[in-house]
Amino acid sequence: MRRAAPILATAALFLLPLAFMDARTYVTLTVAGLAMGMLIFLVAAGLTLIFGLMDVLNFAHGALFSWGAYVGFSVALLLNQRWGWAAAPSVPLNVLLLAASILAAMVVAVGLGILLERVIVRPVYGRHMFQILITLGATIVIEELIRMIWGPNDQVMPVPLTFQGSWDVADVIVLRFPVVAIVLGVLVYLGITLLLTRTRVGLIVRAGVENGEMIQVLGHNIYRYFTRVFAAGSALAALGGVMWAMFSQSVRPAMGGEQLIFAFIVVIIGGLGSVTGSLLGALIVGLSYNYVAFLVPKAAIGINMAIMVLILLLRPTGLFGAGK
């Protein structure tokens, strides 16, 4: 019952906007908010693994998000220019383009994540101030590499034809790509939850966070597992980057830094190390932003900060504390 209370309270809270708008507007805003929340969750999920499980303050997470977006952009642009996959009226080709963009982005991000973890993060485990400084420095370097390779200007992200447009459901306009983002977010959540709670690797990682020395004594190289966790978190950042690029239909070098702020808010709201908390926090952020942007546009930017402060006043450990 204690774990269900935040979910029930959140559900009740987000039924309130129905009192201030008609049902069709509410449904449209809710779908958009759920999509935005799921996209933020894809970024926050990787941050939860790295920050919540490994106790590493990785400010380079946003830069990996940007790299994923740009690699996905390059693959999508290449496939569209050479074979016209994005513009083709073919669902299989459109899905293949999205899958290829995501796969390429995640592979590159895994390589970058392993390099970052082994070279600059591993020497500063347990020292938060050094982690902040060194990952901020890495962020500057990685973003400058983006500007050197792709240029400083915004680029238009090719969006597959299948995911463009909208459906008219009972006089409610539902955009197609947000639905794809919602489905993908749910699948990622289920995958991470099963990995951490139902597999040997997940149990070793969670035990290593609690008592790394004991895991080492039992014959497991905990640093090897931490490298894998860091790589997985980096891959999720890249996945979020590709999906956000298609959602906004553009890429820009600083886009990762903007999303990193939302990701940290989500992780803090949900509770460190809680994947379920991150999902709920992301939905709170996405929905509240869309509702408030419609009702009181000037308050949209500050609403998520206000919610974070309120939740921390009521529950200092976040909605789900340190548990999962």
Image (tube, rainbow, N blue to C red):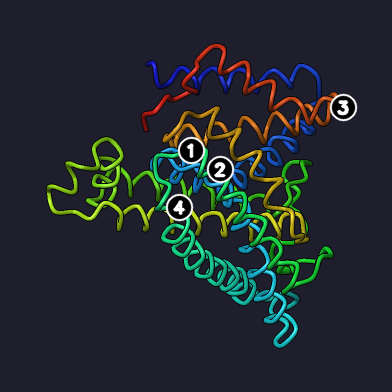
Q: State which tag comes first along the sequence, 4 or 1.
A: 4
Mark 3 or 1: the one toward you:
1
Q: Real-space Cα distance between discs 1 and 2? A: 6 Å
| Position of 24 relative to 236 (above/below) | above
Q: Amino acid at mark 2?
A: Ile
Q: In terms of sequence position, does the residue under pointer 4 or pointer 2 come before the other?
A: 4
Q: Find out whether the residues at labels 4 and 3 contact each other: C-beta distance under 8 Å.
A: no
Q: Badges 1 and 2: C-beta atoms under 8 Å apart? A: yes
Q: Is residue 61 left or right of residue 244?
A: left
Q: CA distance from mark 2 to mark 3?
A: 32 Å
- Picture quadrant of residue 83: bottom right
Which kind of residue does numbered mark 1 sit on? His
> Rounded to the nearest whole Å, what is the CA distance between mark 4 and mark 1?
10 Å
What residue is disc 2 on? 132
Q: Which residue is mark 4?
A: 121
Judged from the image, the secondary structure of the residue bearing numbered disc 3 is helix
The residue labelled by disc 1 is 128
User: Element type at marker 4?
Assistant: helix
Question: What amino acid is at disc 3?
Answer: Lys
Q: Secondary structure at mark 1?
A: helix
